[in-house]
Amino acid sequence: MDDFLRLSASTARFTHGAPRAFSFGDDGRLLWFLRSTGPTDAFDSLWVLDTTTGAETRLADPRELCPEPGPLPVAERRLRERTRLVAAGIGSYALSGDGLHAVFALYGRLFEVAAGGASTPKEIPAAGPALDPRPNADGSRTAYVADDVLYVAPGGRISPDDGARWGLAEFAAAEELGRPRGHWWSPDGVTLLAARVDESALQRRWFADPAHPELPAEDFAYPEAGGPNADVRLWVLGAGGTRIRLDWDADTYPYVSDAGWESATEILLTVQDRLQRCVLLLSADPATGRTRELSRTTHPQWVDPLVPGTPARLADGRMLTSADTPNGAARALAVDGALLTGDGIQVRAVAGVHEGRLLIEAGLRDPSEQQVLLLDPDTGELTPVADGPGVHTVSASAGTLLLTCADADGVRRTVRTADGREFTPADLSEPLPYRVDAVLERVTERGIPTALVLPRDHVTGRRLPVLVDGYGGPGMQDVTADQRRRQHRQWWADQGFAVVTIDNRGTPYVSPAYTHAMYRGFSEVTLDDQVAALHALAARHTDLDLGRVGVRGWSYGGYLSAMAVLRRPDVFHAAAAGAAPTDFRHYDTAYTERYLGLPQEHPEVYERDSLIPDAPKLSRPLLLITGLADDNVHPSHTLRLSQALTDAGRPHQLLALPGVTHMTPGGTREKLMALELEFFRRELA
């Protein structure tokens, strides 16, 4: 590997040493976060910043607590995959309701620590390899999961012995619905709301490591499109062994995408039907389990995921929810069902209340940027808080803000207190190597967002081979003003390519209508927009040589890459396809059925979007890559396509990586980039 790739690998893509996982505590006085000691240190410690003084204190060092760490418990390893967590050491933590205590799991052991004084971490005795600990309001008790059982310390087992999994999110919720947790303390710290997950009807997925044939295979329950889902119910587990089940029509609305305590006497939960066309916000009485409907959102295709921070009750009792404007032009907010925002703003998150108004993250201009604004919940009036060029995010508590700006100059974080003082949490990460001057343009009559990165030494008039590098699938924005997303594209450009990224229809943040255009049309919409945008860019930038076009991507981007050379060899001349879901009949229920419907009802849609029937058409170089420990896009996807290509007598390359998961940690991605570079240089010469 060259110097850039070695640096990228050793710094985990320039993230080691950067503070992350911020949480306010003690009414904004404390700012908790995780950070390692520098750019090559993978082990995150737990820190707290006192906003009254700006002083930072390290409260827990994983190497002191576990000098000889063992392997992660299987359940925690899989939860980290679901949440895309690659950091070693303390991966996550949870705060007590008062924000003065934190608990965390470390290689199956549990620890608690308090802020202030000479506090040192104390180990919490656990019943077995533990994960996902959650403290109650004052930190006096901690709930955690071990071997699919929900425990409380001090106390003991709290979930019944009924063969189900308790206290954890099922695969669909954690991977696709944005709910990675499965238990919640009541405000008084006495009662727990817990998910009961019955996966007995699901098929099993198996993983064997061919590099270690002496080891047994692993398996887990997987909800394949068209097949059964996990049976998920919510229970209130109280003192003295009382158990109350929340009562809603779980057969019609099997997905629980959000849940939690609104008060001691009310639980809010959001449930969805299987095709996610109808989403209900329910209020539940924890004493009886009875529920009542607060709002209903429907869409003929699918209801987009909730805006983070909604639903929520305002101080006057009104309900804040997500909504789309009637023409599908904007993601909006509604109060008691009445729209609060309109077509001129794309709301992306609600961060809380500040100065009596809603603090929101939203797009006012180009989809590549994001602003922080105050929104009056009565009038809809907007006041900018951070609206310069770039991607701005915010967290808030009791008048104190944490503002983060990612723009052409890198990443800056500022703590701003209610009385006007400012602090900057120390960032010990490797500085970003490149200032990437990407050309961001909207092209074609559809206004497709694109980014073009050229070699830093490019001379106008020198023709360049093109590398299309992107994702293209639902839920992921690739064209952004955040410099962190461009570093590796600048490296590719400096190898002699014009690097093009295209956010085709189906991707987020342009408009709900733009996103929904992908309905029952993964392959057609994705490929049509990629080709149209590529040609439009080449018409504007004549140094792009469309006689030499490569395409690379991972996950849905791998699907796009393989599809490009199989179906449009006239446009794309070589492809590297990593972790590609080659046949969505074998992908998970919640994601696939949201966009394509049920395979039993629409077999033609699944057949049209499958790449397996295209195998005999391959006429361009294709490099297939898969991790053999990938529990998201199972390696069978890539192997099935490889088998079909072999059966059709179509030459291709296959790179199967033992022990590698969907996240390709530990420098694997950089090693793959070096191999892909050789491939594209050879095939596009």
Image (cartoon, rainbow, N blue to C red):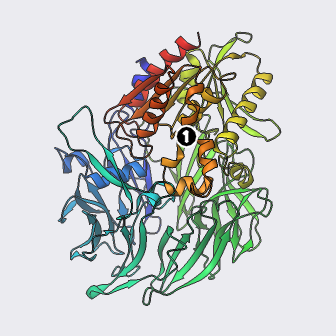
Q: How many marks?
A: 1
Q: Which one is in front, 622 or 156?
A: 622
- SS of the residue under disc 1: helix
Residue 114 position within the rendered picture, expressed as x and y whole percent measured from the top left: 29, 64
On the image, the x and y values in percent for residue 157 come to 22, 74
Q: In the image, what residue type sits under mark 1?
A: Tyr
Above or below, 20 against 248 in this view is above
Q: Is residue 67 left or right of residue 77?
A: left
Disc 1: which residue? 556
Q: Residue at x 52, y 79 (%)?
A: 249
Give above or below for 210 relative to 147. Answer: above
Quadrant housing residue 303: bottom right
Q: Nearer the viewer, residue 154 or 112?
A: 154
Q: Position of residue 590 (x, y in %)?
A: 52, 58
Quarter of the picture holding the N terminus: top left
Quarter residue 288 falls in: bottom left
Q: Residue at coordinates 33% horizontally, 75% vertically from top-left?
A: 138
The residue depicted at 40 percent of the width and 61 percent of the height is 170
Side (left or right) of 411 relative to 633: right
Extreme residue toward the bottom, this view:
288
* Few, some or many residues within 10 Å of mark 1 (<14, 14–19, 20+): many
Percent position (x, y) of residue 30? 42, 61
The residue lying toward the viewer, choosing from 164 and 186, is 164
Q: Does residue 174 appear in the picture of this structure?
A: yes
User: Is 254 placed above or below 495 here?
Assistant: below
